Amino acid sequence: MDDLMPLLQRAVEHAVAYRTSLPERRVRAELDVDALAAAFDGPLQAQALPPGEVLDQLAAAAEPGLVATAGPRFFGFVIGGALPAATAADVLASGWDQVAFNNVASPAGAAAERAAGTWLKLLLGLPDLASVGFVTGAQAANTVGLAAGRHHQLGAAGWDVERRGLAGAPRLRVIASEERHATVDRSLRLLGLGSDVVEPVRADAGGAMDVDDLARVLAAAEPGPTLLCLQAGNVNTGACDDVRRAVQVARRHGPAWVHVDGAFGLWAAASPRTRHLLDGLELADSWGCDGHKWLNVPYDSAFAFCAHPDVHVAAMSYTASYLTGSGGAPGPADLTAESSRRARGFAVWAALKELGRDGVTDLVDRTCALARRFADALREAGFEIANDVVLNQVLVAFGSDQHTDAVVEAVQRDGTCWMGATTWRGRRYMRISVSNHATSEADVDRSVAAIIRLAQEVSA
Ligand SMILES: *Cc1c(COP(=O)(O)O)cnc(C)c1O
């Protein structure tokens, strides 16, 4: 134990030095994965090493390969940087080393998830009776939501899919937008439905589902077991499907389980300024949402919400005779695909406490305003903004596809900020996501200045 204090202090010193360097550090990594190999590789020695030495070796090896995703000028992939209290809570979660398996294995881990789950439902306007599974990411949240839907829809048709699997099962239709996130297809693969099962619905110009086309797709078959997967927050444009109309159209046709993939976009519901984008959200049956994106919680953290807790548990739970505390009131592992896992509820609880209700609203409003600031400044500089900036996403082109790609590459190499590239409606764009609590107007202005300078250099 004597050794632990200096060791953990040392770890904290490394972490704090890194975090403190973020505002001025180059965003991109200094070395790529192959260049880092020399520091990480080599034979595993036979003898034990003192933990402090291991820690210092790790820090020295990793530092040049870290990307400042946690910093204020990382604008890729819709991901935020962990809030201070959430980061500290995650350090504690490692120190406590709890297994958030059930209510007996870690009462504290389970209680934190229960409280944080209640707050999340309130903030997002989801039914208070909904169940919440604390999963690794929106990928996992979508898998859980669609698994619950699979159980429910096939169960209503007299088929117990958990026992019997899919061979010989009634047909289960899966309807989703052509603009669905690529992870939805992987969820369908994992659920044994396969990605070919999707009956795609056309999207409108902004990337939201065309609900008239949904009616056409639904009408192509008789009413029967159906999963309808909607989206809150298109990864390119931020557009949200019209949940109210889509649910009405689907339910008019026949039975349907409606799942909403709201990895980042579900947070639009936490602000009065953007809530209208998700009108009717509470009418769905399940929802997936990330903590590690817009809520600025450390990886890996996301939420699988289900309006029908019994269905959620029936689709996910398992028991075994040796598992003390299984059965009875559903615990953490009854709502996720993981069995033993990290107590990730502590960091979520801490993030929500740190922000408070007003802070969550402010986080959404502020990052959306900063996205508009990006769009306004780049438009004024003569560049084309391709999307209506309804949330925190901006698409900007710098002339031809080749030119746009060259600008994105130059920006990434420069290191003032980091943006990815994407293809939208057949053209290449720089994709800007503002999701970090620490990003300021000055960070946006500094990034815009770098982008304009590099765009000119690339042309020259
Ligand atoms: C990021 C994202 C996902 C996948 O989320 P992970 O947290 O990476 O698992 C799914 N859907 C949408 C819309 C996303 O933006």
Image (cartoon, rainbow, N blue to C red):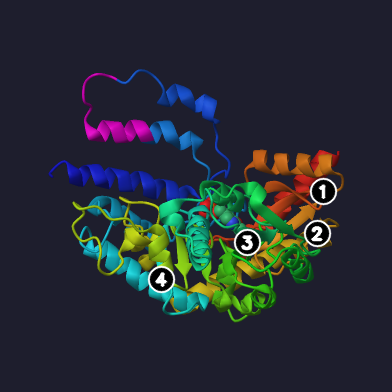
Q: CA distance from mark 4 to mark 2?
A: 41 Å
The residue lying at 49 percent from left, 58 percent from top is 147
230 or 404: nearer the viewer: 230
Where is residue 244 drawn, in percent x and y?
65, 78
Q: Is residue 234 visible?
A: yes
Q: Nearer the viewer, mark 1 or mark 3?
A: 1
Given residues 196 and 204, the one toward you in this image is: 196
Instruction: Look at label 1 and name its amino acid.
Output: Arg
For residue 127: magenta?
Answer: no
Q: Which mark is residue 309?
A: 4
- Distance from the alpha carbon under mark 1 to that under mark 4: 43 Å
Ligand 1 image-quadrant field: bottom right
**Label 2, label 3: how many angstroms apart (C-alpha)?**
24 Å
Q: Nearer the viewer, mark 3 or mark 4?
A: 4
Q: Quadrant of residue 384?
A: bottom right
Q: Position of residue 139 (x, y in %)?
A: 52, 53
Looking at the figure, which quarter contains the C terminus?
A: top right
Q: Is residue 287 above or below residue 321?
A: below
> What span is colored magenta in the figure?
45-58
Q: At numbered mark 1, what does the secondary structure look like: helix, strand or loop?
A: strand
Q: In the rendered image, is residue 352 in sight?
A: no
Upstream in the sequence, badge 1 or badge 4?
Answer: 4
Single out the mark in the foreground, 2 or 3.
2
Residue bearing the label numbered 1: 427
Q: Which is nearer the N-term, disc 1 or disc 2? A: 2
Question: Going by the image, does 181 lie left or right of 363?
Answer: right
Disc marking residue 386: 2
Residue 198 lies, in percent from the top left, at 67, 54
Question: What kind of residue is marked 2?
Answer: Ala
Disc number at residue 442?
Answer: 3
